[in-house]
C-alpha cells in the first residue's frame, strides 16, 4: 500500500510505545454470550442458529446490565490496546418494543461505560427496520431494535448534540436487508456532514444470494451504485466480494472493518485480503461479537487465514514495509481516523519490554513478536489523550468492573 | 466419536479443575525465533524460506542456550495448561557436525529443563539422515541433525535406560524424505516394545508430490503400507490426505498430532478434521514451533479453520458430547497416553473461577468459555502427578527462567 507509512515502535523507559488501536466494530452486549453459543443445536449449525442465541441474550438486557457489561468490555479493550471503539448499537428499546424514557437510555448506558473507562466512543445507533429483503416486518424478538426514520433521526440528533473529545456519533445501517432503499436515502440526506456511516454487508452467502434475487445485484455492488460511499463509510465484513467489488470499495475510499475472530466463529468465510491490499484498499479490525478481545489475535488470524488458503507465508507484507506486523499495524492506523471520526494521535499503548517474548527485540521486530506470538497480555500502559488509564497492565476499574459484571451476569443468566 | 467420553470440569475450592493437557509436538529451540520469521524475504515466501530462518537459529544453539530456552518454554507450557510434552528433538551435534561429549548433551539439556520445571517429557530423538527423497547427503546446515543408524540406536539406548515417572523415550523419524526405507526398517526392528514412534508427514504439498514421484505413493499411503503403524504411532501434521488415507490412519489406531497455529503460520493448509472425526480417528495437539504456546488457541483455531472452509459452525461437536469445547477436550485426552507413553491421570489444571469470563459458568459451558474466549491466562494451579508446579498462575521458576532466557537470547541474537 503505497500511501501507508510503516509504524515503528518507540523504546521508552516504560517499554515499547505504539499508537493506540481502533476497534471498528463492537456489539457490546454480546460479550455476555462469549463461549455460550458453541453447543450443539442443529446438525447444520450455522450463523443463523448463532443468531437465535444472540436474540435470547439481547432480550434480557436493560440499561443497567448493558452499562455493566460494556464497562467490563471497555476495560478489557483498553487493557488489550484498543483506545477507540465504534459501537454498532441496535438494542434500543424495552423488550416489548416500547421506547425507554429517555429514548436514548440504552445509548446512555454505553456512553457512561465509555466515560468511566476512558475509551473513545464512536456511537453508531443502528437503523433496523425490516425483517428481510422481502420488506417483512420485524419479528417479535427484533422489536427492541426497530425504528422508523423520523424516530431514528430524533435519536441521532439528540446524541449528536452531545459530541465532545471522547464521543463521536454517526449512523449505522444494520444491513441492506434491514433498511429499505428509500429509508436509506432519507437518513443519509439528513445526516450531519461529520457523521460516519457504518453498515454490515456481504457477511453471509445467503444474504448475497437474496440481494441478487431481490435487488438484481450483489450487496456491495448495489451499495456502491445507490449510495454516496466515500471515506466517511465503513463496510463491516464485506466477506463475499467479486473482483469489481474489491476494486470499487478501494476506489471509494471507504474502510472495510474486518473481524477475523468473529467471522471465524460464525463460519462467515475469508475476505480476499491480498487482492484488496493490491488495490490499495483501506481496512481496519473489529472485535464485533467479542468472542475474543485481542487486537493481536485479530491481526494474526487475518494474516493466517490468507496463508492457509494460499499456502504461502507473509501475505500482508508490502515492498514499502519491513515485515508483516508493521504492515498490519500501518493498515490499522491508516484507516482509524476516517472510520472512527477521532484523530487520536496522542493515544498510546506501551508494551512491557521486560517479558521473555520481547528479549532482544528491536523496533523492526517488536510488532511481529507481539502480533504473532503475543499470547499473554503484554500491554503495560495505555494513554487516551493525555490520560493514563492502564498501569502495570491493569485498568483502574479492573476490580470494580469485574464485580459489577459478575452481578449483571447473574441477572442475565437467571 | 463413539468411544470418547465427554470431559467435564469439576468445581473445587481452587476453581474449575480439568485434566492436564498433552502437547504432542515440540521443537523447543524454535521458541527463540517466535515472531522473527515474519519479515519479507521473497515475494513467493513459503515454508521453505521460513526453514532458512530456522536453520540460522538452530546453528547458534549449544547445550546451555538450549536448556535456558527449553526451561522458559516449559514454564510457559505449564502455566498454559500443558502437563506433558513430546520433544521432537533434532539438534543433536556441535555446529560442525561432530558429536558432543557426551553425545546426548543436547538431549540432556532438554531432560534437565523438564526436570527443573516438572513437566513430563516424552523425548523423541530424531533420526535425520538424508537431504531429500533423492537420497542426497545432508547439507552443511543439517549436519547438526544427522545420524547413521548405529549411532542413533546407541543414543536411543542410552536415553531409554534413563526412563522414569517423568521421562519417556521414543523414536522420531524426521520424515519420509529424511529417512531411507531400509534405515526405517532397521530402527523400527530395534526399538524397545514401549517406544512411541512419531513422524512428520504430509505437511507440505511439494513433499507429497515428491513422494509420489520417487516412491509411487502419497506419503501416508506409503507409510501405512510399509511400516507397522499402530496405536504407538503419532503422525505429525498429516495435512494433505485423500479419503483412503483418512480412513487408513483412523483404522491403524495411530494419533494425528495437529499443530494449528504453526500450520497456519507456515501456510501448510487445513487438515480434513470433519472427515477424520467421522472415521473415529485419534488426534491431539502440539505447539510445534511455539509461535503460540496456548492449548486453547490450538483448539479454537482447529475448529475455526473448519468453520471458515465449510461455512458452518460447531464442526467438532458430536452426538455424544454437549458442546464443541467438551468434544475437543475429550479428543485431546483420549489420545494422550498412547501418544506420550504417560498415563498421567493425576495431572490437573485448575482455572481461576473468579475471572469475569467465567462468571456464571457451569460444568457444561466452562470448557467452551475457556477454549473460545480465553484470551487471558486463566490457569491458576497446575499439578503434575502429586506435585503443584503452578500457583496463582505462576510457575515457581517464572522469574528465574525469564532471566536465564533473556541472557540466552542475548547470546543467540548476538
Image (cartoon, coloured by chain):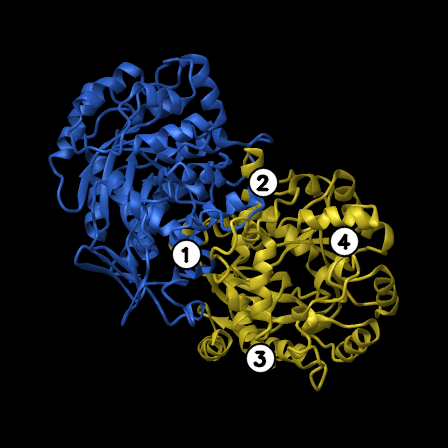
Chain colours: A yellow, B blue
Badge 4 density bin: few <14, some 14–19, many ≥20, Cα 10 Å? many
Q: Residue at x 81, y 50 (%)?
A: A214
The spot of residue B9 in percent (x, y) is 32, 61
Q: Establish whether labels 1 and 2 are both on one chain.
A: no
Residue B322 disc label = 1
Residue A306 disc label = 2
What is the chain letter for disc 1?
Answer: B
The spot of residue A221 in percent (x, y) is 80, 47
Q: Residue at x 22, y 22 (%)?
A: B187
Q: Nearer the viewer, residue B109 or B380?
A: B380
Q: Is residue A38 visible?
A: yes
- Relative to B311, B193 lies left or right: left
Badge 1 density bin: few <14, some 14–19, many ≥20, Cα 10 Å? some
Whether A338 is drawn above or below A56: the answer is above
Observer-side mark, 1 or 3, equals 1
Q: Which residue is mark 4?
A: A254
The spot of residue B192 in percent (x, y) is 15, 29
Mark 4–mark 2 Cα distance, whole angstroms, equals 22 Å
- Relative to A128, B175 lies left or right: left
Farthest bottom residue in view = A101
Farthest left residue in view = B161
Q: Nearer the viewer, residue B151 or A58?
A: A58
What is the chain letter for disc 3?
Answer: A
Mark 4–mark 3 Cα distance, whole angstroms, equals 31 Å
Residue A116 disc label = 3
Mark 3–mark 2 Cα distance, whole angstroms, equals 38 Å
**Residue B129 sits in quarter:** top left
Amino acid at each position: 500500500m503505497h500511501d501507508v507509512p510503516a509504524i515503528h515502535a518507540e523504546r521508552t523507559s516504560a517499554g515499547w510505545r505504539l499508537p493506540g488501536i481502533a476497534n471498528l466494530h463492537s456489539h457490546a452486549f454480546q460479550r455476555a454470550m462469549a463461549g455460550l453459543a458453541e453447543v450443539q443445536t442443529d446438525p447444520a449449525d450455522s450463523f443463523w442458529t448463532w443468531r437465535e442465541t444472540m436474540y435470547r441474550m439481547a432480550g434480557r438486557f436493560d440499561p443497567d446490565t448493558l452499562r455493566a457489561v460494556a464497562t467490563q468490555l471497555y476495560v478489557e479493550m483498553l487493557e488489550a490496546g484498543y483506545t477507540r471503539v465504534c459501537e454498532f448499537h441496535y438494542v434500543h428499546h424495552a423488550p416489548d418494543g416500547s421506547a425507554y424514557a429517555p429514548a436514548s437510555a440504552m445509548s446512555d448506558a454505553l456512553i457512561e461505560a465509555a466515560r468511566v473507562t476512558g475509551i473513545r466512543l464512536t456511537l453508531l445507533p443502528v437503523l433496523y427496520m425490516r425483517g428481510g429483503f422481502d420488506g417483512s416486518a420485524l419479528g417479535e424478538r427484533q422489536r427492541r431494535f426497530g425504528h422508523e426514520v423520523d424516530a431514528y433521526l430524533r435519536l441521532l440528533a439528540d446524541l449528536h448534540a452531545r459530541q465532545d473529545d471522547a464521543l463521536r456519533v454517526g449512523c449505522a445501517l444494520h444491513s441492506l436487508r434491514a433498511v429499505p432503499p428509500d429509508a436509506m436515502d432519507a437518513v443519509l440526506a439528513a445526516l450531519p456532514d461529520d457523521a460516519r456511516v457504518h453498515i454490515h454487508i456481504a457477511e453471509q452467502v445467503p444474504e448475497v444470494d437474496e440481494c441478487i434475487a431481490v435487488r438484481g445485484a450483489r450487496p456491495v455492488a448495489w451499495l456502491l451504485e445507490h449510495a454516496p460511499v466515500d471515506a466517511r463509510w465503513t463496510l463491516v465484513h464485506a466477506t463475499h466480494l467479486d473482483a469489481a467489488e474489491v476494486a470499487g470499495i478501494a476506489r471509494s475510499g471507504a474502510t472495510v472493518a474486518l473481524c477475523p475472530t468473529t467471522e471465524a466463529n460464525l463460519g462467515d468465510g475469508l475476505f480476499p485480503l491480498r487482492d484488496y491490499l493490491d488495490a490499495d484498499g483501506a481496512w481496519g479490525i473489529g472485535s464485533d461479537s467479542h468472542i475474543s478481545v485481542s487486537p493481536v489475535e485479530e491481526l494474526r488470524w487475518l494474516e493466517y487465514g490468507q496463508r492457509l488458503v494460499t499456502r504461502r507465508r507473509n501475505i500482508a507484507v508490502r515492498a514499502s514495509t519491513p515485515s508483516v506486523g508493521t504492515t498490519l499495524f500501518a493498515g490499522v492506523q491508516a484507516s482509524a481516523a476516517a472510520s472512527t471520526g477521532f484523530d487520536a494521535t496522542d493515544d498510546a499503548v506501551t508494551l512491557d519490554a521486560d517479558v521473555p517474548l520481547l528479549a532482544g527485540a528491536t523496533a523492526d521486530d517488536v510488532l511481529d513478536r507481539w502480533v504473532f506470538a503475543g499470547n499473554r497480555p503484554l500491554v503495560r500502559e495505555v494513554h487516551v489523550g493525555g490520560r493514563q488509564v492502564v498501569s502495570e497492565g491493569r485498568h483502574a476499574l479492573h476490580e470494580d468492573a469485574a464485580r459489577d459484571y459478575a452481578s449483571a451476569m447473574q441477572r442475565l443468566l437467571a
